Amino acid sequence: MRVAAVGDVHLGADSRGRLRPALLDLPAHADALLLAGDLTRLGTRAEAEAVAAEFGDLAVPVVAVLGNHDYHSDLAEEMTALLVAHGITVLEGEATVLTIGDRTLGIAGTKGFGGGFAGKCASAFGEPQMREFADHTVELADGLHAALSELRTDVTIALTHYSPISDTLHGEPPEIYPFLGSYLLGEAIDACEVDLAVHGHAHAGIERGTTPGGIRVRNVAQPVIGAEYAVYDLAPIGDPVAAE
């Protein structure tokens, strides 16, 4: 089972045709495509239409989460509806199951949020704004955990925009780690039987990392992978190995 993934493509209204030629060959390389958020620059209707034109109606299933850029114009619900209309599954605290050959692939997804990592993280204390910030992280991490817990599939993937670990943030300024991810996402992933976790958001980070529980994590932000997508071969034992 081969899964392609990319995030942070940041398409503008003028980006149609930028990725589509490479995506048309996708069935030769992968069984499904995961989009790890920040599909647009500013989350406008015109940009969402460009995303739909690039990633919609491909010959393999496409599953996405939105990123912080996709929320900027307050049109996330409209964008989701548009992508769904073009055959793209968009997850937020939900899971979907794909049948690939004689095996099942379960994907649970959320945008996720910031907050930081163990020992250096935000807490729901003090001003209402700080409590709202921390509570949003808890809410989305809990949603990911609930979605993962529902899955009973041969292979399970957690798909987020924000990072569940600090490993894949190396190269980013440490001062902004709290705005790039949260350990609560990692805890949700470790609590479930997950074969691979995929995220974006950290443009200056690195591709590979591991949760404290030993789950492999891949940062597929396009500036990191340097390609239209990366492909991971999920071997029968559930050990993801980069195939391309």
Image: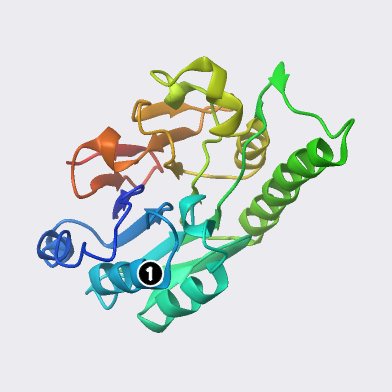
Q: Residue at x 21, y 62 (%)?
A: 15
Dot 1 corresponds to which residue? 48
Q: Quadrant of residue 100?
A: bottom left
Q: Quadrant of residue 170?
A: top left
Q: Is residue 104 visible to us here?
A: no
Tag 1's secondary structure?
helix
- Foreground pick, 17 / 91: 17
Quadrant where the N terminus is found in the figure: bottom left
Q: Quadrant of residue 57?
A: bottom left
- Foreground pick, 155 / 92: 92
Q: Residue at x 39, y 36 (%)?
A: 218
Q: Residue at x 56, y 35 (%)?
A: 164
Q: Amino acid at mark 1?
A: Ala
Residue 241: give x, y in percent of width and height: 29, 37
Residue 177: give x, y in percent of width and height: 55, 24
Q: Dot 1 surroundings within 10 Å: few (below 14), some, or many (20 or more)?
A: many
Residue 142: give x, y in percent of width and height: 73, 49
Q: Residue at x 64, y 59 (%)?
A: 147
